[in-house]
């Protein structure tokens, strides 16, 4: 139990470090992936997350990693990802892009005794839109819980149009 708690703290620290890192501008990073810090909503207080947006030939790869989900949540954990026009403070209620081809969250926990869906969690999908288009106007990523868990917004992050990207 103690080892599991320490792992959780280390992972949260790593995610926090990634979310707070200084990112290079698009020009410096060669037009690479964009990191979007995901803020937990009131129902998921204390958790952190990060979405990586990667330009692909046929759209944008979206990988979401989160430190946890509200308790109680059904297992295995399902994360539903959406891109909305607007910002987290002023979202268009209808998603512009529904990224639900894959919703079963993958556990990043590498301990053999870990639960099959224990935190941290990851889910990846592809948005059928170029990254440049997503960055050309205000858009936000919203991560929701499974319908069985109330379909609640648990994370939100604004896609930055000012040029912050992760280094390659």
Image (cartoon, rainbow, N blue to C red):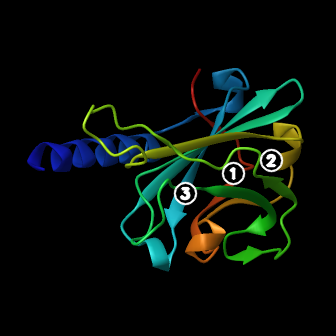
The residue mark sitting in front, 3 or 1, is: 3
Q: Which mark is residue 160?
A: 1
Depth check: give the residue in front, 22 or 151. Answer: 151
| Residue 119 appears in the picture as rendered | yes
The residue mark sitting in front, 3 or 2, is: 3
The number of numbered badges drawn on the structure is 3
Q: For label 1, count other residues whose C-alpha is less than 10 Å away and answer few (under 14), some (14-19) or many (20+).
A: many
Question: Which circle's residue, 3 or 1, is located before the other in the chain?
Answer: 3
Q: Secondary structure at mark 3?
A: strand
Question: Which circle's residue, 1 or 2, is located before the other in the chain?
Answer: 2
Q: Which mark is residue 38?
A: 3
Q: Which mark is residue 68?
A: none
Depth check: give the residue in front, 35 or 40. Answer: 40
Q: Residue at image x 85%, y 55%?
A: 97
Q: Which residue is mark 2?
A: 135
Q: Residue 162 in the image: x percent, y percent?
A: 71, 47
Depth check: give the residue in front, 153 or 132. Answer: 153
């Amino acid at each position: 139990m103690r080892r599991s708690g320490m792992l959780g703290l280390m992972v949260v620290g790593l995610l926090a470090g990634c979310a707070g890192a200084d990112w290079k501008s698009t020009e410096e990073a060669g037009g690479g992936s964009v990191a979007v810090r995901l803020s937990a909503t009131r129902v998921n207080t204390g958790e952190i997350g990060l979405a990586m947006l990667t330009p692909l030939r046929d759209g944008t790869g979206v990988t979401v990693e989160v430190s946890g989900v509200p308790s109680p949540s059904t297992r295995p954990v399902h994360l539903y990802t959406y891109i909305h026009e607007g910002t987290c403070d002023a979202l268009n209620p209808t998603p512009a892009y529904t990224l639900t081809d894959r919703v079963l969250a993958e556990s990043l926990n590498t301990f053999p005794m870990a639960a099959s869906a224990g935190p941290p969690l990851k889910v990846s999908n592809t948005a059928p839109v170029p990254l440049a288009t997503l960055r050309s106007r205000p858009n936000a990523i919203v991560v929701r819980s499974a319908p069985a868990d109330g379909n609640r917004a648990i994370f939100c992050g604004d896609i930055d149009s000012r040029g912050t990207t992760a280094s390659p």
